[in-house]
Amino acid sequence: MKNFPSRVILTLLLGFAITLTLNAQTPKKFIGTWDQNAPDASGYETAKVVIEKQSISTKFTNGSQNTAEKIKYESDTLRFNMDVDGEYVTCYVVVKDKNNLKGFASWSTGTTGLILTRTKDE
């Protein structure tokens, strides 16, 4: 019975550490709805991008909708992949300020700048 208090404390500390780790993997600065501008992606220049804790989805103005794969948060950087109408696209963005992310998207035949601006209704 002497080990009981130490086990409780150890369990609480472990739970706290796991919570911190999970929260650190999804920086709150990325969470929200964003307007996308990708000037060199013909037909896919603009979209709404929704970044949630476990998912990223896009809805392009041409009606195409997609969900991201292999989402990875690293400090001020977000990387993810997406199948856009049969084309594998790799995206990389960095936080510029609380309302702007900037990076690029690349696919088999090209690359474009990628600018995400937080929507005003957030």
Image (cartoon, rainbow, N blue to C red):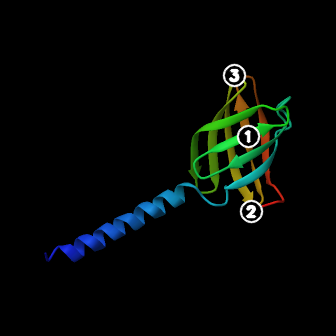
Amino acid bearing label 3: Gly
Q: Amino acid at mark 2?
A: Lys
Label placed on residue 49? none
Mark 2, secondary structure of its residue: loop
Q: Residue at x 35, y 69 (%)?
A: 13
Residue 33 falls left or right of residue 26: right
Mark 1 highlights which residue?
Answer: 58
In the image, residue 60 above or below residue 115: above
Q: Who is closer to the viewer here, 80 or 122?
A: 122
Residue type, mark 1 in image: Thr
Q: Nearer the viewer, residue 24 or 103?
A: 24
In the image, residue 66 lies at what x, y percent? Answer: 70, 34
Q: Earlier in the sequence, mark 3 or mark 1?
A: 1
Q: Quadrant of residue 64?
A: top right
Give the labeled residue for mark 2: 98
Q: Quadrant of the image for the N terminus? A: bottom left
According to the picture, the residue beneath numbered tag 3 turns out to be 86
Q: Position of residue 111 (x, y in %)?
A: 76, 32
Residues at marks 2 and 1, CA–CA distance in whole angstroms: 20 Å
Q: Quadrant of the C terminus?
A: bottom right
Q: Residues within 10 Å of mark 3 (few under 14, many from 20)?
A: few
Of residue 114 and residue 11, the one placed in the foreground of this image is 11
